[in-house]
Amino acid sequence: MTTAHIPVITIDGPTASGKGTVAHKVALDLHFHYLDSGALYRLTALSALRKNVDLRDEHAIAKLAEDLPCRFSGEHVFLDQIDVSAAIRAEEVGNTASKIAALPTVRQALYGLQLGFRKAPGLVADGRDMGTVIFPQAQLKVFLTASVEARAERRYKQLIGKGFSANMHDLLKDLTERDARDANRKIAPLKPAEGAHVLDTSAMTADEAVEQVRKWYADLKKHHVV
Ligand code: DC
């Protein structure tokens, strides 16, 4: 059965742009499913790190991605039945995720898994290539961005709040490097999808961004597009 009629809202953007928070809230408000695609790259990275797989061995990493024993339950993520919700948020895992995400066979291995999240009554998909590659026919596409300074500050607060140590100087450097890697890779680079609404959240709260996305979605409903 085709899933083309099931509405999809894609929310793409750089690291720490707030897209996770915004996408999650929009999904809750609309009672839609939620896909945190970054978590799939983080799970693959964590799995590779824990198994000591050589990060240059594209085939071995793609194999991990293809057979990823993961499960999502509310805000929790499990790998091999172990709750890794906090572990996948560590900076080392994020950096490794960004590196392996540049490998074409890894992206291909995660493609089908991501499509499977499109279930009634709808899906909010958060990532880098949700609107460009995975769900190019999405009814609503959003590209969330924010200055690198605003994002570093958010990430700093997030990490400290979760009990990790953090340093602004290192965070700024990491974010800038990760942005460059995500935006300049050959396959599925980070960029706004065709027809995407671009929203700069540097001076916005998460709730204001959620309101804007909901307004765009309500406008589509009003015009019977969804
Ligand atoms: O959104 P995040 O920080 O959890 O994502 C972790 C890494 O995964 C990010 O640096 C790039 C990669 N990623 C990707 O390439 N494509 C996606 N759709 C989501 C994440």
Image (cartoon, helix red, strand yellow):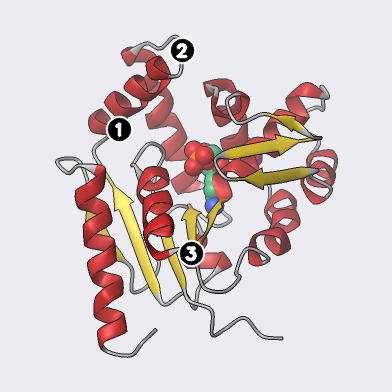
**Judging from the image, what secondary structure is the residue with disc 3 in?**
loop
Label 3 vs label 1, nearer the camera? 3
Percent position (x, y) of residue 47?
76, 31
> Measuring 61% from the left and 70% from the top, which residue is drawn there?
119
The secondary element bearing badge 1 is classed as: helix
Dot 1: within a 10 Å radius of its alpha carbon, few (fewer than 14), some, or many (20 or more) residues?
many
Residue 136's mark?
Answer: none
Q: Position of residue 51 (x, y in %)?
A: 83, 24
Q: Earlier in the sequence, mark 2 or mark 3?
A: 3
- Return the x and y of residue 148 as percentages of the image width and height: 28, 33
Position of the C terminus by quadrant = bottom left
Distance between mark 2 and mark 3 Cα atoms: 30 Å
* Vertical arrangement, residue 86 with respect to residue 185, above or below: above
Identified by mark 2, the residue type is: Gly
Rounded to the nearest whole Å, what is the CA distance between mark 3 and mark 1?
26 Å
Counting residues from the start of the chain, the first of labels 2 and 1 encountered is 1
85 relative position to 145: left or right: right
Task: Check disc 1 and report the residue beneath it.
Answer: 151
Query: Which residue matches tag 2?
Result: 163
Q: Going by the image, does 75 lie left or right of 143? A: right
What amino acid type should be assigned to the residue bearing mark 3?
Phe
Q: Quadrant of residue 10?
A: bottom left
Q: Quadrant of residue 223?
A: bottom left
Q: CA distance from mark 2 to mark 1?
A: 18 Å
Q: Which residue type does callout 1 highlight? A: Arg
Residue 199 at what x, y percent from top left?
A: 24, 56
